[in-house]
């Protein structure tokens, strides 16, 4: 049987989804960006995981 792998913050299943590990805790991209992403000084929007 497979162990569940859920977002540490929202508890949504991460099965088949992209996620980010922070301090050994998995976060869905949405939660990680809202909790930990940097903010653009010009437009004040979060800088996402896939930003260049």
Image: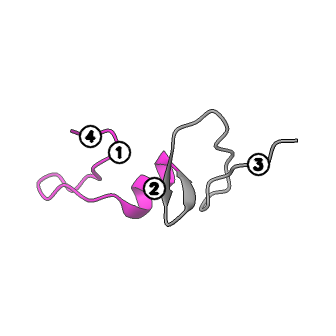
Q: Quadrant of residue 10?
A: bottom right
Of the two numbered discs 2 and 3 on the same chain, state the one appearing first in sequence. 3
Marks 1 and 4, Cα distance to the nearest angstrom? 6 Å
Q: Quadrant of residue 38?
A: bottom left
Of the two numbered discs 3 and 4 on the same chain, state the one appearing first in sequence. 3
The residue singled out by tag 3 in the image is 4
Disc 1 + disc 2, Cβ < 8 Å: yes
Determine crowd level at label 4: few under 14, some 14-19, many 20+ residues with C-alpha closer than 10 A.
few
Of the two numbered discs 3 and 1 on the same chain, state the one appearing first in sequence. 3
The residue singled out by tag 2 in the image is 32
The residue singled out by tag 1 in the image is 49
Disc 1 + disc 4, Cβ < 8 Å: yes
SS for tag 1?
loop
Marks 3 and 4, Cα distance to the nearest angstrom? 29 Å
Which residue sits at x=67%, y=38%?
A: 15
Q: Quadrant of residue 41?
A: bottom left
SS for tag 2?
helix
Furthest toward the right, the residue is 1
Marks 4 and 2, Cα distance to the nearest angstrom? 14 Å
Left or right: 52, with 49 as reference point:
left
Q: Which region is colored magenta?
A: 28-52
Disc 3 + disc 1, Cβ < 8 Å: no
The residue singled out by tag 4 in the image is 51
């Amino acid at each position: 049987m497979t162990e569940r792998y859920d977002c540490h913050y929202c508890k949504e299943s991460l099965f088949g989804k992209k996620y980010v590990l922070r301090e050994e805790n998995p976060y869905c991209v949405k939660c990680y960006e809202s909790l930990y992403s940097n903010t653009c000084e010009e437009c004040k929007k979060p800088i996402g995981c896939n930003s260049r």
